Image (tube, rainbow, N blue to C red):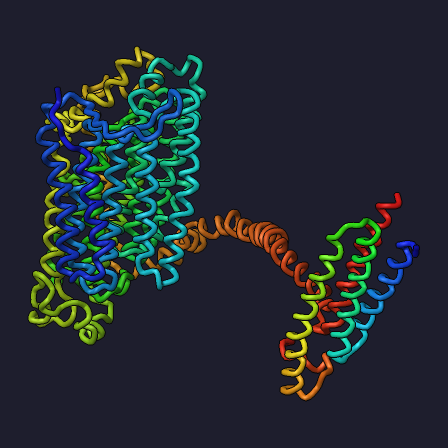
Amino acid sequence: MVPISYYLILSGILFACGVTGFLIKRNIISIFMSIELMLNGVNLSFVAFAAQWHALSGQIFVFFVMVVAAAEAAVGLAVIIAVYRTRETLNVDQVDLLKL
Amino acid sequence: MTPDLHLWLIPVLPLVGAAINGFLGKKFSRQTVAAVALLFSGAAFAMVLFVASRFSSLTTPHVEFLATWIRAGAFQVDFSFYLDQLSLVMLLVVTGVGFLIHIYSVGYMWEEGGFYRFFAYLNVFMFFMLTLVLASNYLLMFIGWEGVGLASYLLIGFWFTRDSAASAGKKAFIVNRVGDFGFLIALFLLIRHFGSLNFEQVFQSVAPITPESGGAGLLTTVGLLLMVGAAGKSAQIPLYVWLPDAMEGPTPVSALIHAATMVTAGVYMVSRSHVIFERAPMALTVVAIIGTLTALFAATIGITQTDIKRVLAYSTVSQLGYMFIACGVGAFSAAIFHLMTHAFFKGLLFLAAGSVIHAVNGEQDMRQMGGLRTKIPWTFWTMTIATFAIAGIPPFAGFFSKDEILWRAYQASWVYWFIGLFTAFLTSFYMFRLWFMTFFGEYRGTAEESHEDSAHDLAHDDTRAGAPAPHGQGHGGIHESPRLMVIPLVMLAVLSFTGGWIGVPASLGGSNRFERFLGPIFHSAIVTEGGSATAAPEKETDGHEPQTGHGTELLFTGISVFAGLVGFVLAWLLYYHDPQLPQRIAAGLGGLYEAVVHKYYIDELYATLFVKPLIAGSALILWHGIDQDVIDASVDNGAQGANEVSDSIRHMQSGNLRSYAGWVAAGAAVVIAYMVWMGTR
């Protein structure tokens, strides 16, 4: 059996990749994907702990996260399309209408 | 059992008038404002007359309790009014003269702006003055005392757009603060040592104290401090400087407040506190000395002034000095007698001077007057009566009161008498100087032409109640005042003529009814005093003749009348017979004359000694030091500090979305690191 620490390290690496991508990418879609990566990194640690402790609640959490992520993806992509249609760009640095 | 007199109505009636005119008067017509003011001040006068008519059936002092004001332990101050012979005399003077001056003011102020404001202030003054007179304790008296100061300030600065008037008002107010400070400390001492401010209680506690026993030092202190207060309000040395400047106010105000009533409050207060003063011989001596010096000092300045109102102002200071001489030698009833006659003739002098000023179109310099005798006959004759009264010529009112004071002063010390006599001569001289310069000789002014030009705005339209047609007499612009102003003049002239007859001394075949009327107040002290003669040796001779006989007194009367006549003759010589002579004399005197003309440079001295250091100190320490460096600095630096801190923090909010995310991530990392570190510890 693979020790839980392996899962947690992988989960941490995935989350760190997501954070890094979120911070350095300028394309909205890449940022969006980075968010998904962070969510899945967290999901991985949830299922790892669920398997470790034989507790079902961890898996339930994962389902919730997936559902919310799917809904978010739907809304988020719609927003991205709307932004692209009005601004002709997906560069977040140029979408700064709310900035003074 | 004494009947219910409703004494409270006396001060409250003018207050109601003041409230109506003050709050609603702006919308009223002049007629309504005048009617309200006259109605309520007249009602107060009627009320006083009613009280006076019932007075003989009262057990005096009659105290009317209204409500408890302050109660702290055993100490209690009430709103209650105190009526005895002394306050009755004051009430009659204040409301009587006050009412006449109200009538006069309607005529005098008719064309002025702020008509309603003037009468509101005037009624407020009446309210506070009557409170002062009727108070049954020192604290209520102090309320009135401060209130008349306020009314005086407002009325001196009535034409507040004129800088000199505004400054004069402030000067009066600030100089009075110095006096009030002494008064307040005296009140604190009374509370501390006698536990009460009630006249009756204080005087009962004071009565057993004699100059030899313990507590006399305390009484001397209290007496001196009360005198400081009185000197401030009654314009005595060294606090007299405000009164001449107070002439910036309208002339009726000068007559009512700065001659007849308010400035005599100090005399009233000292007389009211006679129980304290009689047991503090040193304080009494100080009172007498201050009175003597002031009388002489102000009279000498009065000789050289050319502004008609300023002559009268210095004359008022001088006459108040007389009253304090009387107080200082223990002749309190003589002081009150002179207070009353002075209210008549000095009120009249001011009103007549106002009438003169009115006639020559606002000119106040006597050098620009002259020859007005035939042009304004009513003013001339009434002013003549007042001048004779103040000069002490029998049988006018001033003669009896002044002679009484001089005689009593002589019994105390010939020094007081001699200076008083010399002052009487000076008084007669400067008053007849004013009289000759104003009414005799050739007219020297230029008001004729200018008056014609401005005749319209000076009040001669038909709307003016009782105004005679001024231009139908063929003598240009100078004209007699309207009837509304002449009537009070005549009534005061009658009083100035006859007012002294109630106090004819025994040596002249009278019975001195006035002194006997006031006797119960000033005598009761002697009874309780129990023969400690040093406190007030003069008092023991009250009412009956001392060792010196009538012959001596008559001789002194003759001397003082002679002094008055010499003043008249000298004024006639200098200002009528040979008008060039005064200049030559002035030139001959040189520096001395210069000093007197400049009022001995007292104003300049005070400016150097007190005002300038105070202003400089205030600017340096209070303004630059405390206000700017502490108060302003704390606020300013606080705001600037917040500004600087936020200026540096502001850069965190760049508007760059990913930098925010970076901060969030960094923060999360810090939190996690902290938790890990805590977990491994």
Task: Name which residue lies at 64% across and 79% down.
Answer: A78
Where's residue B627, x and y in %? 58, 53
Q: How many callouts does the rendering have?
A: 0
- Left or right: A6 in relation to B652: right
Q: Is residue B99 above or below residue B28?
A: above
Q: Which quadrant does the N terminus of chain B fall into? A: top left
Of residues B539 and B388, the one drawn nearer to the viewer in this rendering: B539
Q: Is residue A14 left or right of residue B499?
A: right
Name the foreground residue: B599 vs B492: B492
State left or right for residue B475 relative to residue B122: left
Would you identify the image quadrant in which residue B10 lies? Answer: top left
Which one is nearer the viewer's eye here, A89 or B339? Answer: A89
Residue B417: tell me if it is visible: no
Residue in view at x 16 percent, y 46 percent: B41
The answer, for residue A59, to whether it is visible in the render is yes
User: Which quarter shows the C terminus of chain B?
Assistant: top right
Residue B267 location, quadrant: top left
In the image, what residue occupies the spot 79% across and 77% down?
Answer: A25
Q: Position of residue B174 (x, y in %)?
A: 42, 47
Q: Position of residue B679 (x, y in %)?
A: 85, 45
Residue shown at 40% from the left, 52% from the top: B170
Residue B454 in the image, given as x and y percentages of width and height: 20, 73
Rendered position, B225 above or below B257: above
Query: In this view of the protein, which residue sits in the foreground, B125 or B314?
Result: B125
